[in-house]
Amino acid sequence: MEKKNINWSELGFGYTPTDYRFMAEWKDGSWDEGALISDSNVTISECAGVLQYAQTCFEGLKAYTQKDGSIVTFRPDLNAERLQRSARRLLIPEISTEMFLRALDETVKANAAWVPPYGTGATLYVRPFLFGSGPILGVAPAPYFQFRLFCSPVGPYFKGGIKPIRICISDYDRAAPHGTGDIKAGLNYAMSLYAGDLAHKNGFSENMFLDAATRTYVEETGGANFLFVTKDGKIVTPKSSTILPSITRRSLVYVAEKYLGIEVIERPVPFEEVSEFSEVGVCGTAAVISPVGEIDDHGRKIMVPSGMDQFGPVLGKLRETLTGIQNGDIEAPEGWIRKIC
Protein backbone atom coordinates (compact mmCIF):
# COMPACT_ATOMS: atom_id res chain seq x y z
CA MET A 1 0.00 0.00 0.00
CA GLU A 2 1.45 3.30 -1.11
CA LYS A 3 1.59 6.10 1.45
CA LYS A 4 0.51 9.67 0.71
CA ASN A 5 3.15 11.99 -0.68
CA ILE A 6 3.76 14.00 2.49
CA ASN A 7 6.93 15.32 4.07
CA TRP A 8 6.23 13.41 7.28
CA SER A 9 9.21 14.75 9.21
CA GLU A 10 7.99 18.34 8.74
CA LEU A 11 4.48 17.78 10.09
CA GLY A 12 3.31 19.84 13.04
CA PHE A 13 0.35 19.09 15.28
CA GLY A 14 -2.47 20.31 13.06
CA TYR A 15 -5.57 19.12 11.22
CA THR A 16 -5.15 17.53 7.81
CA PRO A 17 -8.40 15.96 6.57
CA THR A 18 -8.08 12.37 5.39
CA ASP A 19 -10.27 10.39 3.02
CA TYR A 20 -12.75 8.82 5.45
CA ARG A 21 -14.32 9.26 8.87
CA PHE A 22 -16.96 7.34 10.87
CA MET A 23 -20.38 8.66 11.87
CA ALA A 24 -23.28 7.20 13.87
CA GLU A 25 -26.49 8.82 15.16
CA TRP A 26 -28.52 8.31 18.32
CA LYS A 27 -32.29 8.77 17.90
CA ASP A 28 -35.35 7.14 19.44
CA GLY A 29 -33.35 5.62 22.25
CA SER A 30 -30.54 3.83 20.43
CA TRP A 31 -27.49 4.23 18.23
CA ASP A 32 -27.67 3.20 14.59
CA GLU A 33 -24.96 0.98 13.10
CA GLY A 34 -22.89 3.90 11.84
CA ALA A 35 -20.74 3.90 8.72
CA LEU A 36 -17.71 5.37 7.03
CA ILE A 37 -18.38 8.62 5.19
CA SER A 38 -16.20 10.89 3.05
CA ASP A 39 -17.77 14.28 3.89
CA SER A 40 -15.80 16.07 6.62
CA ASN A 41 -18.54 18.66 7.22
CA VAL A 42 -21.15 18.44 9.99
CA THR A 43 -24.67 19.83 9.47
CA ILE A 44 -26.69 20.45 12.65
CA SER A 45 -29.41 22.73 13.98
CA GLU A 46 -28.49 26.23 15.09
CA CYS A 47 -30.09 25.23 18.40
CA ALA A 48 -28.07 22.03 18.79
CA GLY A 49 -27.14 21.05 22.33
CA VAL A 50 -23.45 21.21 21.52
CA LEU A 51 -23.76 24.82 20.33
CA GLN A 52 -26.02 26.06 23.11
CA TYR A 53 -24.76 24.19 26.16
CA ALA A 54 -21.41 22.62 25.17
CA GLN A 55 -22.75 19.07 25.46
CA THR A 56 -19.74 17.30 24.01
CA CYS A 57 -16.83 15.07 25.00
CA PHE A 58 -13.96 13.56 23.06
CA GLU A 59 -10.95 11.27 23.10
CA GLY A 60 -7.49 11.29 21.55
CA LEU A 61 -5.35 8.33 20.53
CA LYS A 62 -2.84 7.43 17.82
CA ALA A 63 -2.21 4.84 15.13
CA TYR A 64 1.38 3.79 14.37
CA THR A 65 3.22 2.00 11.61
CA GLN A 66 5.46 -0.53 13.33
CA LYS A 67 8.80 -1.68 11.98
CA ASP A 68 7.22 -4.79 10.37
CA GLY A 69 4.78 -2.57 8.45
CA SER A 70 1.78 -3.34 10.65
CA ILE A 71 -0.60 -0.53 11.55
CA VAL A 72 -1.60 -0.61 15.21
CA THR A 73 -3.26 1.43 17.92
CA PHE A 74 -2.29 1.69 21.58
CA ARG A 75 -4.66 0.63 24.37
CA PRO A 76 -7.84 1.88 22.63
CA ASP A 77 -10.07 -0.05 25.03
CA LEU A 78 -9.07 2.45 27.73
CA ASN A 79 -10.10 5.34 25.48
CA ALA A 80 -13.49 3.68 25.00
CA GLU A 81 -13.91 3.36 28.76
CA ARG A 82 -12.94 6.98 29.38
CA LEU A 83 -15.32 8.22 26.68
CA GLN A 84 -18.12 6.23 28.32
CA ARG A 85 -17.36 7.83 31.69
CA SER A 86 -17.31 11.31 30.12
CA ALA A 87 -20.62 10.63 28.36
CA ARG A 88 -22.32 9.52 31.58
CA ARG A 89 -21.27 12.73 33.34
CA LEU A 90 -22.64 14.89 30.50
CA LEU A 91 -25.88 12.90 29.98
CA ILE A 92 -24.80 11.73 26.53
CA PRO A 93 -25.75 8.18 25.46
CA GLU A 94 -22.71 5.94 25.77
CA ILE A 95 -20.98 4.30 22.84
CA SER A 96 -20.25 0.64 23.49
CA THR A 97 -16.64 -0.49 23.49
CA GLU A 98 -17.51 -2.77 20.56
CA MET A 99 -18.76 0.15 18.43
CA PHE A 100 -15.85 2.32 19.47
CA LEU A 101 -13.30 -0.28 18.40
CA ARG A 102 -15.16 -1.06 15.17
CA ALA A 103 -15.24 2.63 14.25
CA LEU A 104 -11.55 2.92 15.07
CA ASP A 105 -10.54 -0.14 13.05
CA GLU A 106 -12.63 0.79 10.02
CA THR A 107 -11.52 4.42 9.93
CA VAL A 108 -7.80 3.77 10.40
CA LYS A 109 -7.83 0.92 7.87
CA ALA A 110 -9.66 3.08 5.31
CA ASN A 111 -7.04 5.82 5.85
CA ALA A 112 -4.00 3.50 5.94
CA ALA A 113 -2.21 5.59 3.30
CA TRP A 114 -2.26 8.50 5.77
CA VAL A 115 -0.55 6.60 8.60
CA PRO A 116 3.04 7.95 8.67
CA PRO A 117 5.79 5.41 7.88
CA TYR A 118 7.84 3.83 10.64
CA GLY A 119 10.80 5.91 11.76
CA THR A 120 9.49 9.32 10.64
CA GLY A 121 8.53 10.48 14.13
CA ALA A 122 5.00 11.23 12.91
CA THR A 123 1.79 9.38 13.79
CA LEU A 124 -1.87 9.29 12.81
CA TYR A 125 -3.85 11.12 15.48
CA VAL A 126 -7.39 9.78 15.96
CA ARG A 127 -10.18 11.93 17.41
CA PRO A 128 -13.43 10.22 18.50
CA PHE A 129 -16.11 12.56 19.82
CA LEU A 130 -19.74 12.69 20.94
CA PHE A 131 -22.03 15.70 20.84
CA GLY A 132 -25.63 16.81 21.20
CA SER A 133 -26.79 17.40 17.61
CA GLY A 134 -30.52 17.81 18.27
CA PRO A 135 -32.14 21.20 19.03
CA ILE A 136 -32.75 22.11 22.66
CA LEU A 137 -33.66 25.60 23.95
CA GLY A 138 -34.25 24.96 27.62
CA VAL A 139 -31.30 23.79 29.70
CA ALA A 140 -31.52 20.04 29.22
CA PRO A 141 -29.80 17.21 27.32
CA ALA A 142 -30.17 17.28 23.53
CA PRO A 143 -32.85 15.00 22.04
CA TYR A 144 -30.38 13.24 19.76
CA PHE A 145 -26.64 12.88 19.31
CA GLN A 146 -23.83 12.03 16.95
CA PHE A 147 -20.69 9.94 17.39
CA ARG A 148 -17.89 10.74 14.99
CA LEU A 149 -14.32 9.63 14.59
CA PHE A 150 -11.78 11.22 12.27
CA CYS A 151 -8.02 11.13 11.95
CA SER A 152 -5.14 13.36 10.88
CA PRO A 153 -1.40 12.76 10.41
CA VAL A 154 0.58 14.79 12.95
CA GLY A 155 4.08 15.59 14.11
CA PRO A 156 5.20 16.76 17.60
CA TYR A 157 2.64 18.55 19.77
CA PHE A 158 4.99 21.35 20.79
CA LYS A 159 6.98 23.40 18.31
CA GLY A 160 10.62 22.40 18.29
CA GLY A 161 9.83 18.71 18.75
CA ILE A 162 10.85 17.29 22.12
CA LYS A 163 13.16 20.06 23.28
CA PRO A 164 12.43 21.36 26.80
CA ILE A 165 9.62 23.90 27.00
CA ARG A 166 8.98 27.00 29.13
CA ILE A 167 5.72 27.10 31.09
CA CYS A 168 4.13 29.56 33.50
CA ILE A 169 1.81 29.52 36.49
CA SER A 170 -1.72 30.44 35.47
CA ASP A 171 -3.86 32.91 37.40
CA TYR A 172 -6.93 31.11 36.07
CA ASP A 173 -8.47 27.81 37.11
CA ARG A 174 -8.86 24.87 34.78
CA ALA A 175 -11.39 22.88 36.82
CA ALA A 176 -13.34 23.22 40.06
CA PRO A 177 -13.71 20.66 42.84
CA HIS A 178 -16.67 18.36 42.08
CA GLY A 179 -16.70 19.72 38.53
CA THR A 180 -15.69 18.09 35.24
CA GLY A 181 -11.90 18.15 35.48
CA ASP A 182 -11.69 14.35 35.60
CA ILE A 183 -13.53 13.78 32.31
CA LYS A 184 -12.58 14.75 28.77
CA ALA A 185 -15.27 17.36 28.23
CA GLY A 186 -14.90 19.98 25.53
CA LEU A 187 -15.84 22.69 28.00
CA ASN A 188 -12.71 21.96 30.08
CA TYR A 189 -10.54 22.88 27.13
CA ALA A 190 -12.61 25.97 26.37
CA MET A 191 -11.92 27.03 29.96
CA SER A 192 -8.17 26.80 29.30
CA LEU A 193 -8.12 28.75 26.01
CA TYR A 194 -7.85 32.27 27.44
CA ALA A 195 -5.11 31.28 29.87
CA GLY A 196 -3.32 29.40 27.11
CA ASP A 197 -3.45 32.39 24.80
CA LEU A 198 -1.97 34.61 27.51
CA ALA A 199 0.83 32.11 28.08
CA HIS A 200 1.67 31.95 24.37
CA LYS A 201 1.68 35.75 24.05
CA ASN A 202 4.17 35.88 26.91
CA GLY A 203 6.47 33.35 25.26
CA PHE A 204 5.45 30.20 27.12
CA SER A 205 4.36 26.88 25.63
CA GLU A 206 1.86 25.99 28.33
CA ASN A 207 0.39 26.80 31.73
CA MET A 208 0.80 25.03 35.00
CA PHE A 209 -2.65 25.08 36.62
CA LEU A 210 -2.91 24.93 40.39
CA ASP A 211 -5.87 23.52 42.32
CA ALA A 212 -8.84 25.86 42.35
CA ALA A 213 -9.65 25.33 46.03
CA THR A 214 -6.35 26.42 47.61
CA ARG A 215 -4.06 27.30 44.67
CA THR A 216 -1.21 25.51 46.42
CA TYR A 217 -1.11 22.11 44.64
CA VAL A 218 -0.04 21.28 41.10
CA GLU A 219 -2.84 20.04 38.85
CA GLU A 220 -2.01 19.75 35.12
CA THR A 221 -1.53 21.83 31.98
CA GLY A 222 -4.28 22.70 29.53
CA GLY A 223 -3.90 19.29 27.90
CA ALA A 224 -1.37 17.10 29.71
CA ASN A 225 -0.48 15.59 33.09
CA PHE A 226 2.74 16.30 34.98
CA LEU A 227 5.59 13.94 35.83
CA PHE A 228 8.30 14.94 38.32
CA VAL A 229 11.59 13.21 39.09
CA THR A 230 13.13 13.43 42.53
CA LYS A 231 16.84 13.85 43.12
CA ASP A 232 17.11 10.17 44.02
CA GLY A 233 15.48 9.08 40.75
CA LYS A 234 11.89 8.38 41.81
CA ILE A 235 8.94 9.56 39.72
CA VAL A 236 6.17 11.58 41.35
CA THR A 237 2.87 12.30 39.63
CA PRO A 238 0.17 14.60 41.07
CA LYS A 239 -2.98 13.08 42.54
CA SER A 240 -6.23 15.03 42.49
CA SER A 241 -9.93 14.40 41.78
CA THR A 242 -9.90 17.26 39.27
CA ILE A 243 -7.07 15.92 37.07
CA LEU A 244 -7.97 14.05 33.89
CA PRO A 245 -6.74 10.44 34.29
CA SER A 246 -4.31 10.22 31.38
CA ILE A 247 -3.97 6.87 29.60
CA THR A 248 -0.44 7.85 28.64
CA ARG A 249 0.43 8.62 32.26
CA ARG A 250 -1.09 5.32 33.36
CA SER A 251 1.03 3.51 30.78
CA LEU A 252 4.18 5.41 31.71
CA VAL A 253 3.72 4.49 35.36
CA TYR A 254 3.56 0.80 34.41
CA VAL A 255 6.58 1.10 32.12
CA ALA A 256 8.59 2.92 34.78
CA GLU A 257 7.86 0.28 37.40
CA LYS A 258 7.87 -2.93 35.35
CA TYR A 259 10.37 -2.17 32.57
CA LEU A 260 12.77 0.28 34.20
CA GLY A 261 12.48 -0.61 37.89
CA ILE A 262 11.71 2.97 38.91
CA GLU A 263 9.57 3.67 41.95
CA VAL A 264 6.51 5.80 41.13
CA ILE A 265 4.60 7.76 43.77
CA GLU A 266 1.16 9.26 43.08
CA ARG A 267 0.32 11.96 45.64
CA PRO A 268 -0.68 15.61 45.96
CA VAL A 269 2.27 17.78 44.92
CA PRO A 270 2.56 21.20 46.62
CA PHE A 271 3.77 23.86 44.21
CA GLU A 272 6.44 24.92 46.73
CA GLU A 273 8.04 21.51 46.20
CA VAL A 274 8.46 21.87 42.41
CA SER A 275 11.83 23.60 42.65
CA GLU A 276 13.24 20.53 44.43
CA PHE A 277 12.70 18.13 41.52
CA SER A 278 15.55 17.24 39.16
CA GLU A 279 13.34 16.70 36.08
CA VAL A 280 9.88 17.90 35.07
CA GLY A 281 7.78 16.70 32.15
CA VAL A 282 4.26 16.84 30.76
CA CYS A 283 2.65 13.74 29.32
CA GLY A 284 -0.36 12.88 27.19
CA THR A 285 -1.38 11.23 23.94
CA ALA A 286 -0.35 14.19 21.82
CA ALA A 287 2.92 15.00 23.60
CA VAL A 288 3.89 11.49 24.88
CA ILE A 289 6.40 13.22 27.20
CA SER A 290 7.74 16.72 26.69
CA PRO A 291 10.44 17.94 29.08
CA VAL A 292 10.01 21.21 30.96
CA GLY A 293 13.11 23.34 31.40
CA GLU A 294 11.72 26.49 33.00
CA ILE A 295 8.69 27.40 35.11
CA ASP A 296 7.78 31.05 35.52
CA ASP A 297 5.95 32.03 38.71
CA HIS A 298 4.96 35.62 37.99
CA GLY A 299 8.50 36.63 37.10
CA ARG A 300 10.28 34.29 39.50
CA LYS A 301 12.01 31.71 37.35
CA ILE A 302 12.36 28.12 38.47
CA MET A 303 15.07 26.53 36.34
CA VAL A 304 14.73 22.74 36.21
CA PRO A 305 18.18 21.14 36.77
CA SER A 306 17.87 18.97 33.63
CA GLY A 307 18.13 22.22 31.63
CA MET A 308 16.76 23.72 28.43
CA ASP A 309 18.80 21.67 25.95
CA GLN A 310 17.69 18.06 26.27
CA PHE A 311 15.68 15.47 28.18
CA GLY A 312 16.78 14.51 31.64
CA PRO A 313 18.01 10.90 31.88
CA VAL A 314 14.96 9.44 33.66
CA LEU A 315 12.18 10.97 31.57
CA GLY A 316 14.25 10.53 28.41
CA LYS A 317 14.58 6.80 29.02
CA LEU A 318 10.92 6.56 29.96
CA ARG A 319 9.82 8.22 26.73
CA GLU A 320 12.19 6.08 24.68
CA THR A 321 10.79 2.92 26.23
CA LEU A 322 7.12 3.80 25.76
CA THR A 323 7.57 4.91 22.14
CA GLY A 324 9.59 1.75 21.56
CA ILE A 325 6.59 -0.28 22.71
CA GLN A 326 4.22 1.74 20.52
CA ASN A 327 6.46 1.42 17.46
CA GLY A 328 7.08 -2.29 17.90
CA ASP A 329 10.77 -2.05 18.85
CA ILE A 330 10.10 -3.32 22.39
CA GLU A 331 7.72 -6.13 23.32
CA ALA A 332 4.47 -4.73 24.68
CA PRO A 333 2.51 -5.97 27.69
CA GLU A 334 -0.34 -8.27 26.72
CA GLY A 335 -3.36 -6.39 25.37
CA TRP A 336 -1.65 -3.04 24.87
CA ILE A 337 -1.31 -3.18 21.08
CA ARG A 338 -4.34 -3.58 18.79
CA LYS A 339 -3.34 -4.57 15.26
CA ILE A 340 -5.55 -3.07 12.57
CA CYS A 341 -3.86 -4.17 9.35
Image: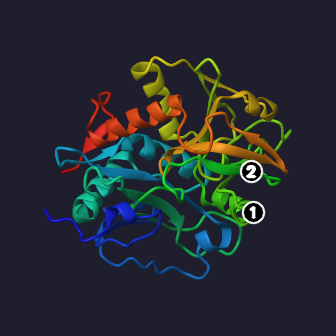
**Front residue (pair 291, 102):** 291
x then y, percent, for residue 245: 57, 39
* For residue 172, above or below residue 202: above
Tell me which corner region of the image, top left, top right, bottom left or bottom right, holds residue 150.
bottom left
Residue 259 spot, x, y in % from top left: 39, 22
Are circles 2 and 1 on residues that touch, CB within 8 Å? yes
Q: Residues within 10 Å of mark 1 (few under 14, many from 20)?
A: few
Q: Give above or below for 123 relative to 209.
A: below
Q: What crowding class fits label 2: few (fewer than 14 Cα within 10 Å), some (14-19), or many (20 or more)?
A: many
Q: In this rendering, would 159 be left or right of 77?
A: right
Indicate the position of residue 280 as horizontal and vertical percent values.
63, 36
Badge 1 element:
loop
Q: Distance between the residues labelled 2 and 1?
A: 9 Å
The residue wearing badge 2 is 168
* 17 and 256: which is toward the camera: 256
Report the label total: 2
Identify which residue is drawn at 65% across, 41% down.
243
**150 lies above or below 210:** below
Three-letter residue code for mark 1: Asn
Q: Which is more N-terminal, label 1 or label 2?
A: 2
| Residue that numbered label 1 is attached to | 202
Instruction: Give the residue at x 47% y 52%.
Output: 94
Q: Which residue is drawn at 53% across and 39% down?
A: 311
Residue located 84% across and 51% down the image? 299
**Residue type of the residue flagged with mark 2:** Cys
Residue 328: horizontal and vertical position, in percent?
A: 26, 38
